[in-house]
Image (cartoon, helix red, strand yellow):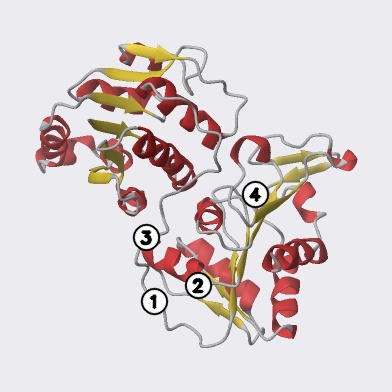
């Protein structure tokens, strides 16, 4: 059986879909997947051994300049690649309007969540078959349930298997000392811990004889990493790296402390000791999951009954701005204690 999976972005969402593929492989021997994904994250699907072909979409770039993309032949090439194979099933695990359009373009019977379960209402009209998958479930559980119901096998009760144990990760030569990874960036400013907390964590790592590596993806993130690392001898701002190279660095790390962002999901899926801080988002729905992964969340703190607010701008009492006050209140001590506990497992 050959399935086309439509899951375009983002990094964390892609990682959270990998256990559903492992479930399907265990339940249906011989099943294989092709995967349509945003070009920025195309490395992630290639990590799973059951993914045979990765079909890259550049929908964000195409949307900015549709005319030149069409004239350059990229859209036609994508169309031909998408329709080259007739699939036994085309499965939309993003359920947005744009993923529904891609699903509809592909050849084969289409399946996805019903109208009560899709991310964007209207996406369900692209599917021949629709199944109920509650939106109150954690994302990993949602996709495992969608695959099980869509492909017709019992939902496993096992821990998530991300399918990453057999990957030959690239080796690094950044430092010869033990190291932690500090993921200081996030897609929203309101998801970021304050610089002072990161600097305290780096100082604590120095006391344990460890370096701290700081990855980044955009110029503003590099500037922030450099600002945090300034004057701290054990802080190393990494060069710009691809996702597979970053995964290799995470795989050899003593642990990671992360904002709510995609690299947290990779660290957790690799089984590394990992602590993720959650302020405006709900860890019950999207937390990084792994055998040695925990989170520190503002949710449940009586001083921040507004969490999770899902706002890019914090409105807390008299404050108005990009710095989530619930994350400003988190301490380096609390994060370090949680990480230390995971490292002892």
Find numbered disc 3 in the image and state the secondary structure of the residue it sits on: loop
Find numbered disc 1 in the image and state the secondary structure of the residue it sits on: loop
In this view, the residue in front, 120 or 272, is: 272
The quarter in which the N terminus is drawn is top left
Q: Earlier in the sequence, mark 1 or mark 4?
A: 1
Q: Earlier in the sequence, mark 3 or mark 4?
A: 3
On screen, residue 123 above or below 304: above
Q: Are marks 1 and 3 in contact (CB under 8 Å)?
A: no
Q: Is residue 162 left or right of residue 61?
A: right
Determine which residue is flagged by label 3: 166
In space, the residues marked 3 and 4 are separated at their CA atoms by 32 Å
In space, the residues marked 1 and 4 are separated at their CA atoms by 30 Å
Residue 4: image quadrant is: top left
Q: Are marks 2 and 1 in contact (CB under 8 Å)?
A: yes
- For the point 43% across and 26% down, which residue is it? 148
Q: Earlier in the sequence, mark 2 or mark 1?
A: 1
Percent x, y of residue 67:
18, 36
Determine which residue is flagged by label 1: 171
In space, the residues marked 2 and 3 are separated at their CA atoms by 15 Å
Determine which residue is flagged by label 4: 191
Determine which residue is flagged by label 2: 252
């Amino acid at each position: 059986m050959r399935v086309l999976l439509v899951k375009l972005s983002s990094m964390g969402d892609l990682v959270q879909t990998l256990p559903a593929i492992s479930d399907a492989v265990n339940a249906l021997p011989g099943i294989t997947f092709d995967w349509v994904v945003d070009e920025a994250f195309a490395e992630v699907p290639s990590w799973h051994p059951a993914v045979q072909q990765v079909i890259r979409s550049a929908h964000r770039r195409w949307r900015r300049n549709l005319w030149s993309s069409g004239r350059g032949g990229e859209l036609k090439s994508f169309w031909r690649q998408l329709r080259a194979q007739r699939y036994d099933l085309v499965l939309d695990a993003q359920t947005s309007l744009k993923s529904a359009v891609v699903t509809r373009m592909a050849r084969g019977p289409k399946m996805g969540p019903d109208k009560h379960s899709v991310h964007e209402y209207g996406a369900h009209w692209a599917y021949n078959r629709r199944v109920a998958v509650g939106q109150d479930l954690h994302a990993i559980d949602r996709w495992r349930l969608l695959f099980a119901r869509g492909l017709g096998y019992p939902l496993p009760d096992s821990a998530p298997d991300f399918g990453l144990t057999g990957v030959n990760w690239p080796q690094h030569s950044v430092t010869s000392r033990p190291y932690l990874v500090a993921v200081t960036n996030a897609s929203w400013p309101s998801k970021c811990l304050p610089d002072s907390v990161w600097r305290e964590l780096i100082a604590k790592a120095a006391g344990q004889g460890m370096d701290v590596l700081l990855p980044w993806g955009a110029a503003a993130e590099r500037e922030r990493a450099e600002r945090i690392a300034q004057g701290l001898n054990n802080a190393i701002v990494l060069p710009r790296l691809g996702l597979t190279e970053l995964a290799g660095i995470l795989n050899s790390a003593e642990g990671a402390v992360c904002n709510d962002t995609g690299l947290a999901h990779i660290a957790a899926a690799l089984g590394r000791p990992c602590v993720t801080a959650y302020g405006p988002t709900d860890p019950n729905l999207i937390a990084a999951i792994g055998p040695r992964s925990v989170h520190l969340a503002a949710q449940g703190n009586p001083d921040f009954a507004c969490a999770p607010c899902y706002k890019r701008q914090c409105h807390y009492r008299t404050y108005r701005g990009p710095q989530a006050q619930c994350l400003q209140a988190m301490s380096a001590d609390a994060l370090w204690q949680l990480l230390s506990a995971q490292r002892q497992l």
